[in-house]
Image (cartoon, rainbow, N blue to C red):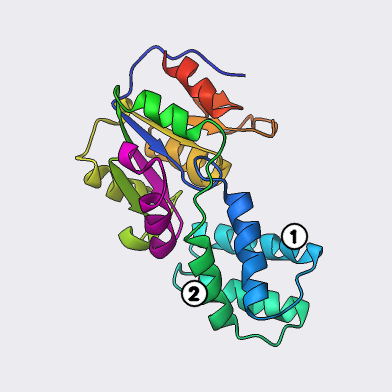
Amino acid sequence: MRDRVTKRYSWLLFDADGTLFDYDRAESLALTETFQAFEVPFEGQYLDTYRRINQELWRALERREISSSALPVRRFELLAHTLNLACSPDRMSSVYLERLALAVDLIDDAQDLLRTLHSTCRMAIVTNGFESVQRSRLANSVIRDYITELIISEEVGAAKPKPAFFAAAFARLGDPDKSEVLLIGDSLTADMQGGADYGVDTCWYNPSGEIRPDDLQITYEITRLRDLLEVLD
């Protein structure tokens, strides 16, 4: 389901993981390779356990209950405790981030979409990811030439959905008028709530068809990235 737009945007701000980059695939591969590096057998349920721990910590980051510097190692501390692993959480975290930084698989339609939009507006990535991972991935990705700015929470000192993150992002973009900016992302909290609170239009990328919350202001909704072209037409 989507709504028609009646204005043109000069800036499109895309979330990275789960919106442009195929984070599920990257996460699964990086975690598997990390266990292999430590010669620890990787069992299927380990991925679900890691994802549960990781998601809880990212939500805690959004609430400012943990710092971005502490999160990478903390998730492996919790994973090691839960799975009774003897490996060093600090070393596992380092290997995992190295593997994750090499993962450049994109969501379906991402490359074609950005190639098409490149001539009509400027585009930036706004992400709560880590600098070492996100800069490496973008630099090695086929979409790198379409992205004008990469704004990372770890670098600006604030994370989505906090207004301070968006204020820093807008400063990097030259302080465009909020009415000329559209935020596209898959997270209801970091992206949709964050964008609404900051006063910009939002587009929820909702590929799994989740129920749209009645109490959250969302300007547009798409289930496929290529549907953004119809929204912007």
Query: Which residue: 39% across, 11% down?
Result: 6
Pick out the residue farthest to the left: 174
Establish if 13 lies above or below 154: above
Number of numbered callouts drawn: 2
Measured from the top left, where is residue 38 in percent x and y? 65, 81
Q: Quadrant of residue 68?
A: bottom left
**Dot 1: element:** helix
Residue type, numbered disc 2: Ala
Residue type, numbered disc 1: Asp
Query: Which residue: 80% across, 68% down?
Result: 43
Label number found at residue 104: none
For the record, the magenta segment spans: 124-147
Q: Magenta stretch: residue 101 in it?
A: no
- The Cα–Cα distance between marks 2 and 1, rounded to whole angstroms, is 21 Å
Establish if 35 lies above or below 13: below
Query: Which residue: 53% across, 16% down?
Result: 3
Label number found at residue 48: 1
Measured from the top left, where is residue 155 in percent x and y? 33, 61
Q: Nearer the viewer, residue 137 or 86?
A: 137
Q: Nearer the viewer, residue 163 or 143?
A: 143
Residue 202 lies left or right of residue 35; in this view the side is: left
| Quadrant of the frame with the N terminus | top right
**Dot 2: element:** loop
Q: Quadrant of residue 175?
A: top left
Mark 1 closeness class: few <14, some 14–19, many ≥20 residues within 10 Å: few
Residue ID for mark 2: 70
- Judge whether residue 55 can be spotted in this image: no
Residue 133 lies left or right of residue 212; in this view the side is: left
- Judge whether residue 183 can be spotted in this image: yes
Q: Magenta stretch: residue 136 in it?
A: yes
Measured from the top left, where is residue 114 in percent x and y? 40, 31
| Quadrant of the frame with the C terminus | top left
